Image (tube, rainbow, N blue to C red):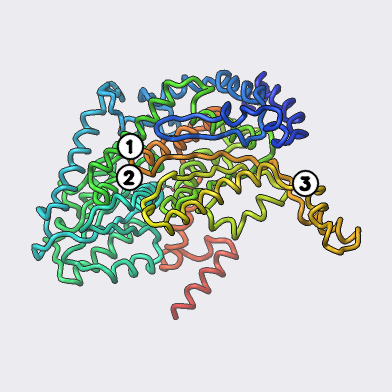
Amino acid sequence: MDKLKKSNAWITLEHHAALVRRYHMRDMFEADPNRAEKYSLSAAGLYLDYSKNLVTQEVLDNLFELINERGVLDKAKAMFSGEKINVTENRAVLHTALRNFSKQPVMFDGKDVMPEIKQTLDKVKSFTESVHSGKHLGFTNKPITKVVSIGIGGSFLGPKIVTEALKPYKKDGVEVVFVANVDGCHIMDVLKSCDSEQTLFVMSSKSFSTQETLQNTLSAKAWFLNHGGTQEDIGKHFVAVSSNVDAAVKFGMKAENVFPMGDWVGGRYSLWSAIGLPISLALGFKNFESLLKGAYDMDKHFVEAPAEENMPIILAMLGIWYRNFMDAQSHALLPYYHYLRGFPAYVQQLDMESNGKSTTLNGRTVDYGTGPIIWGSEGTNGQHSFYQLIHQSNLTIPADFMFPLKVPYLKTTEQVKHHQMLASNCFGQTQALMQGKSFEDCYNDLAESGLSDEARRELAAHKTMPGNNPSNTILFDELSPAKLGALIALYEHKVFVQGAVWGLNSFDQWGVELGKELGNQVLDMIQGNMPLEKADASTQSLISKFSKSFK
Ligand code: F6P
């Protein structure tokens, strides 16, 4: 067993949890008029209000003590300095080096990785400029007008949500679309709207062995060759991003068309590497560089700020408070900004693939909760689907609200009204979640209802909202590339801190291997290369039904 639950801070927090359960946030705000100011801070262009949390100062103090007891800051230093902290894959974790603007070297295996990072960034820059300027032409000498980015997981989610979130910064002339799923419907729909003479395919796969990405690229190549392209033209219309350059060349990519990435970048932490090429093609290299600089600002804050004023540490420790002491199983992300609607899905992979584990670094099984279920969707839509549960179920669901103070459309009266309504919903919901509505208030509201007292009490019970639902609110002026970079880095470091406290390896993902392996076996059975009998009865019957559908 890991020693975490035997630590002084943990034991003290368990006592506090028993106490705090009896408190209500309404009373905390009444008791301390400065609560909102005391529990908010700014960093890297972001503002965090964490006052609507069911915590006392003593709870926070002990959460920060837990940081010390678990040596989190030393583990952070080890990560930034290139130590192989991903012990099961014997790899360093250096996504922060990709946005290191400090001009200081980052040593990995005795070598400074910054020159190669700079070289790749220059390659991304010059390729982006050659596509945008029309220097890079298709096989009929027409400019590229569409980029199809093929990849999945971290080779898809980062570029996709960043280009979506930064739509106001999009470069005219080049449209970037994404294909991820191996379901042929996805790529066939995309190819229907492509012109082979003016389409560039960017195949992104760190391992260059992901079945979905390989198959989608093969289909794209077949389509290209059936639509006027020849083998000689492949180099003008296909480039790849991978840490496995040899496999990419073997697959048919021209060596000069492969953008390399270090194997010290985890897939879900890789948008800052050449995996971000689609971002640069969509928004221009300058905006991609601003994204990196924003993340760097958050890195500096994370490394320099004391725990009590450290935004990633505060978010991480509040998450630990609910996960380990207040029985929360999940965490909701509620961006009140249409362009940020993809953010929950991005953090789902970032958080759940990093900390969805139950074995500690030294191979022991945990006896405490670890990674929460991450979910959510854009506001105000969620208010008309799942907010009922957050308000009136008996589940504790901490939620992070995000809101841009400015948006691209604020010129007309109507546009201003939209934004005022968005703000009022965002702030009104966090207030309702916190204060709820008491039975007495609901009962008094029914004074003129004409109901019998019994019926009035019954209805009042249905209308009662316990409140005490915790939330954080993150504000930013407008969602610029730099602010988005800082926001993503904020969550990367939050996940890191939680994994460090829980004693996990947040950087491997063995849990996805078995599904891949058995999936390949089922494919062999479907294609007649392996006897069905190797599978269990249920899988055999499913395969048979599938195969019959082809007869
Ligand atoms: O989901 C497993 C995983 O390895 C992710 O970690 C990764 O982002 C994704 O698959 C795609 O992997 P690759 O970039 O190697 O194709």
Q: Position of residue 267 (x, y in %)?
A: 38, 43
User: What is the distance, in whole Å, between disc 1 and disc 2 at their CAs?
Assistant: 8 Å
Q: Amino acid at mark 1?
A: Asp
Helix, strand or loop status at disc 1: loop
- Mark 1 burial class by Cα count in 10 Å: few <14, some 14-19, many 20+: some
User: What is the distance, in whole Å, between disc 1 and disc 3 at their CAs?
Assistant: 55 Å
State the mark number for residue 438.
3
Q: Which residue is mark 2?
A: 206
Q: Find out if the beta carbon at label 1 lies less than 8 Å from the nearest ligand 1 atom.
A: no
Helix, strand or loop status at disc 3: loop
CB under 8 Å between callouts 1 and 2? yes
Q: Residue at x 19, y 71 (%)?
A: 227
**Which mark is nearer the camera, 1 or 3?**
3
CB under 8 Å between callouts 3 and 2? no
Q: Quadrant of residue 304 in the image?
A: top left
Q: Find out if the beta carbon at label 3 lies less than 8 Å from the nearest ligand 1 atom.
A: no
Could you tell which of marks 1 and 3 lies nearer the N-terminus?
1
Q: Residue furthest front?
A: 413
Q: Find out if the beta carbon at label 2 lies less than 8 Å from the nearest ligand 1 atom.
A: yes
Helix, strand or loop status at disc 2: loop
Q: Residue at x 47, y 34 (%)?
A: 47
The correct choice, above or below, for 88 with respect to 391 in the image is above
Q: Which residue is more in the foreground, 464 or 364? A: 464
Q: Which residue is mark 1?
A: 263
